[in-house]
Image (cartoon, helix red, strand yellow):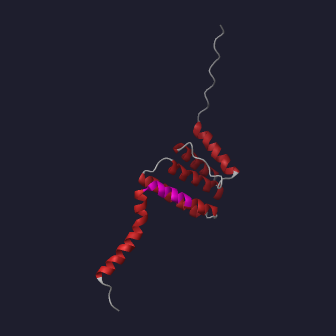
Amino acid sequence: MRALPTSLALAVWAVCLGSTLAPAAASAQNPQATVMQLNQQAMAAYGNLQFAQAMQILKQAEATCQQYNVQGPAKARTYLNMGVVEVGGNQNNAAGLDYFKKALCIDQTVMLDPLSSTPEIETLFNLARSQVASPGRARAPPPPPPPPP
């Protein structure tokens, strides 16, 4: 058996190295797009009832957000989807509520996807919305009526 020429061996090594570095390079070039793509993959797994895999992918999206300082809608969508998986897949309402609140604190305009939502998920999401709107404080009493003339 003959050895590969050095130039061919180097070319094969470069191709292998490039394929392992490509995802990291893609994340560095456009991390928001990567986060949104991971969210799509996670929700496809959720739709296939692969809840653990969906959460694992969403945690990867969360890590990408932290690594590249991704904020705004992409990060909010990640937490929103984590809430959906916790409530709809893992029946963990407390964790789901926490994720919904995180999402709403980042982007109050984030909305549930009707394709992955259920009445239970909607109820918890609306509860999170009300808690974020008035966190732990009672509403101020109405002002007193004006004094009589």
- Check the image and report above or below for 14 versus 93: below
Query: Which part of the image, by quadrant, shows the C terminus?
Result: top right
Determine if residue 90 is in view.
no
Most prominent secondary structure in the magenta stretch? helix
Is 103 inside the magenta-drawn segment? no
- Check the image and report above or below for 132 versus 97: above
| Location of residue 45 in the rendering, given as x and y in whole percent from the top left corner | 59, 63
Residue at 58% across, 54% down:
81
Nearer to us in this view, 91 or 51:
51
Residue at 65% across, 16% down:
145
Residue at 45% across, 51% down:
70
Residue sticking out furthest to the top: 149
| Location of residue 19 in the rendering, given as x and y in whole percent from the top left corner | 41, 70
Is 38 inside the magenta-drawn segment? yes
| Location of residue 132 in the rendering, given as x and y in whole percent from the top left corner | 58, 40
Query: Which part of the image, by quadrant, shows the N terminus?
Result: bottom left
Residue sticking out furthest to the bottom: 1
What is the count of numbered marks? Answer: 0
- Check the image and report above or below for 8 versus 115: below
Residue 39 placement: quadrant: bottom right
Residue bounds of the magenta highlight: 30-40
In this image, 45 relative to 28: left or right? right
In this image, 26 relative to 140: left or right? left
| Location of residue 59 in the rendering, given as x and y in whole percent from the top left corner | 51, 58
Residue at 62% across, 39% down:
130
Determine if residue 68 is in view.
yes
Residue sticking out furthest to the right: 119
- Check the image and report above or below for 87 versus 53: above
Residue 12 placement: quadrant: bottom left
